[in-house]
Structures are given as C-alpha cells and as structure tokens.
Image (cartoon, helix red, strand yellow):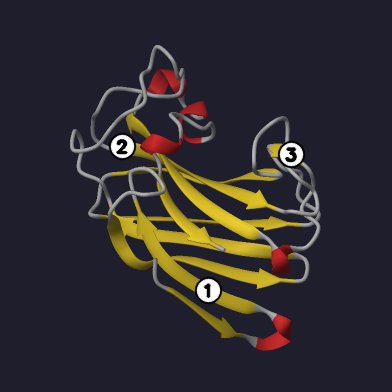
C-alpha cells in the first residue's frame, strides 16, 4: 500500500495511502484516496473513492445488521476510525483501543467522499479516549449499508454494519 507523509505547519503531518476493499487485503480501489492529518490534539480523516456500484459488492445481511438494507439507489456508507494504541492495549478483546464515528452519507453519484474528525477530547463510540494522535496506527473503514430505507434512518448512516470482510480500508501504520 503506497503512502506519503508530509510535514505541515504547527507540527501537523499529512499522510496519504491507497484505499483497498473489500477487506483489509482487498484490491486497490483508489490510489492515495485515504488522507490523515495528525495534530497534537487530534486527527482529520478523509476517504475519497469511486462509489461502489449497487450489487457489485458484498452487503451486510439485514437480518444480522438492523441498519443494513438490500441494494438500492442511493446507497448508504459510513466511515469509522479505528485507533490502535500499543500503550493503551486492546479493548474488550479487540486489537483496537478506540473507535470513532467519522461520517455517514447516502450516495447516488460516481464519487464517494467521507470525512471526519477525532480528537483527544471526543468521546469514542467504543474504547478509550485517544491520548497521542501523533503516534498511533489508524485504520479508516467504510461500511456499506445498502439502499436508502427511510424506516431505519438516521440510524442507517450512523451505525456500523457488516464487518471487516465487507469494508473498504485506508490503513495508516
């Protein structure tokens, strides 16, 4: 996976990596499509990739994931920020120490862009507060939710669906 790190003003860094999917070992879908900006007090995240075409990828089962729906138009996607901090260790048997919700959108166009922020003062969805954004491994994950289902909105684009084998990733070591 290609990666570029550049220094920015104020001690911040900007990193770019390829977006792969589905699954962390999937094929590259967007070269340099993942961006991470690190600062002392937090990170800014962004994934930019072609919108997956309906019915061309694996979908979570709505019977197992209440915020998933069958294929449709527009389709829902959410961005999740997984932080791996060796000093904090894992969380409840998971290798990550912190998870933040990044964004959620219904998308009907050809490009999918999801961006979000996580800081040392943000309350994570799961895990421990982030302590040192400059030195942690970060995985950005895009989860599919299927076609728009008004009966499960806004939860459809605010709740994770599926699992790592169904997600697209940008991994910042």
Q: Is residue 172 left or right of residue 100?
A: left
Residue 131: which quarter of the image? Answer: bottom right
* Quadrant position of the C terminus in the picture: bottom right
Q: Are marks 1 and 3 in contact (CB under 8 Å)?
A: no
For mark 3, what is the residue? 127
Q: Give how far apart the Cα atoms at labels 2 and 3 are.
A: 29 Å
Q: Residue at x 78, y 63 (%)?
A: 132
Taking depth in this image into account, of 172 and 37 the one nearest to the observer is 172
* Left or right of 72 on screen, residue 31: right
Of the numbered discs 2 and 1, the one sitting upstream in the chain is: 1
Per the model, the C-alpha gap separating discs 1 and 3 is: 24 Å
Q: Please provide percent x and percent y for residue 26.
A: 32, 49
Q: Can you tell which mark lies on residue 15?
A: 1
Which residue is pictured at 47% across the width and 72% down the height?
Answer: 16
169 displayed left or right of 148: right
Dot 1 or dot 3, earlier in sequence: 1
Q: Position of residue 100 (x, y in %)?
A: 64, 45
Q: Residues within 10 Å of mark 3 (few under 14, many from 20)?
A: some
Residue at image location 31% in from the left, 29% down from the top = 59
Circle 2 is placed at which residue position?
Answer: 75
Disc 3, SS: strand
Percent x, y of residue 113: 39, 57
Q: Between 84 and 109, which is closer to the camera in this rendering?
A: 84
């Amino acid at each position: 996976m290609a990666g570029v790190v550049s220094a920015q003003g104020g001690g911040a860094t900007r990193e770019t990596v390829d977006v792969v999917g589905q699954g962390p070992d999937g094929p590259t879908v967007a070269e340099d499509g993942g961006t991470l900006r690190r600062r002392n007090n937090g990170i800014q995240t962004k994934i930019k990739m072609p919108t997956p075409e309906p019915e061309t990828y694996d979908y979570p089962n709505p019977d197992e994931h209440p915020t998933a729906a069958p294929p449709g138009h527009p389709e829902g996607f959410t961005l999740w920020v997984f932080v791996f901090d060796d000093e904090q260790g894992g969380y409840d048997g998971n290798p990550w120490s912190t998870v933040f919700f990044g964004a959620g959108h219904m998308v009907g166009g050809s490009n999918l862009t999801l961006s979000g922020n996580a800081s040392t003062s943000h309350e994570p969805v799961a895990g421990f507060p982030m302590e040192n954004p400059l030195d942690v491994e970060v995985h950005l994950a895009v989860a599919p939710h299927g076609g728009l289902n008004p009966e499960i909105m806004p939860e459809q684009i605010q709740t994770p669906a599926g699992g790592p084998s169904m997600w697209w990733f940008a991994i910042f070591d």
